[in-house]
Image (spheres, helix red, strand yellow):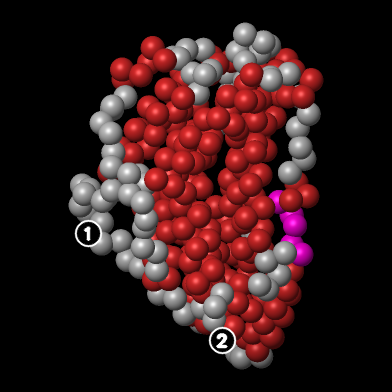
Amino acid sequence: MDRVTNQKHLGLNERLAKESNKLASSFNTRHYSKIKDVDAILLKSDVSVEKKKNILMMELHDFIVRSFSIDKKKFSKKDFGSFKKRLHSIRKIIIKLRSINYYLETTFLHELRIPRTKIANESSKSKLQNGLSRNELEALEYAAYKLIKDVVMLDKRLLSGYSRKEREALGKEKIEIKDISSILRKGSGLLEHLEAKLPPPKAAGIALMKEPVFTHWIARIFALLSYLEHTYAKEAVIFGKIKKNKLARAKINRKISYLMREKSKLLRIMQEKAMSIRGFRVGSKLRKEFHNLTTTISL
């Protein structure tokens, strides 16, 4: 069985708990109602895809921790209205991150000629949906247990429902460039799980704030956020290694606006050629460019 909880991951959990406790202790309705507008960040195209993902990961962390670190004794129906607006922003960030990951997993890896790793033995019971193995989901349950213990606003009476099995902490992990495909896929799976845990504002009811729902819900969201950030840290290490190649570094540093212009230009040329050929059928190359353009525009 793979061991997926290491010292760095545990450290992220501990820092997340401390940050949440600090915010909950200073919860203020006036501050909570001030919600940052994320649309300008979501539409930002004068940066590279890698840089935009980094910005969005930081925004996701900030939004989730600030939105869920509350003092329920002070939390009112008016605050719940602000909470639903915050949910909407979080979901928009996650959806954009999923689009970026899809681009990185497909078009980007193809351009760098890095093969996409295949999921071995997909029918195996040890492999679950979205690139997360069974023991990784168990590790997330353990992380939720630890977070309930450490986060002051969560109900400690619910700890008995979680596994208390201590997991071995590993000091280091070997990370190689060839792992980038599986790491990106794992990140996509975590984003999908996280999105599934966050209902659209219209579907969010005040019952979410009642126990035991609240504690189970928040603990799992924090656990997913922590593991997502742990996975992203490994991705950043690999990108650092890839950048040692001058040509690869140039591709990584290209701005989104440049990518969109280049894809549009190439597609227009191919469409003009297609129109000049009687009985033309869309070939695999043109279909590929359509796909590349679509994934680039979504960034």
* Bounds of the magenta segment: 42-46
Q: Residue at x 37, y 27 (%)?
A: 145
Q: Residue at x 78, y 50 (%)?
A: 40
Tell me the quarter of the image containing the C terminus.
bottom right
Q: Residue at x 73, y 24 (%)?
A: 32
User: Where on the picture, by quarter, is residue 137?
Assistant: top left
Residue under numbered circle 2 = 279
Is residue 64 visible in the rendered image? The answer is yes
Q: Where does the image place residue 209, in percent across and percent down from the top left? A: 55, 16
Left or right: residue 211 versus residue 31 is left
Q: Where does the image place residue 207, in percent across and percent down from the top left? A: 53, 14
271 up-or-down from 136: above or below: below
Please, what is the three-letter code of the amino acid marked with disc 1?
Asn
Q: Residue 206 lies in magenta, yes or no?
A: no
Q: Nearer the viewer, mark 2 or mark 1?
A: 1
Q: Secondary structure at mark 2?
A: loop
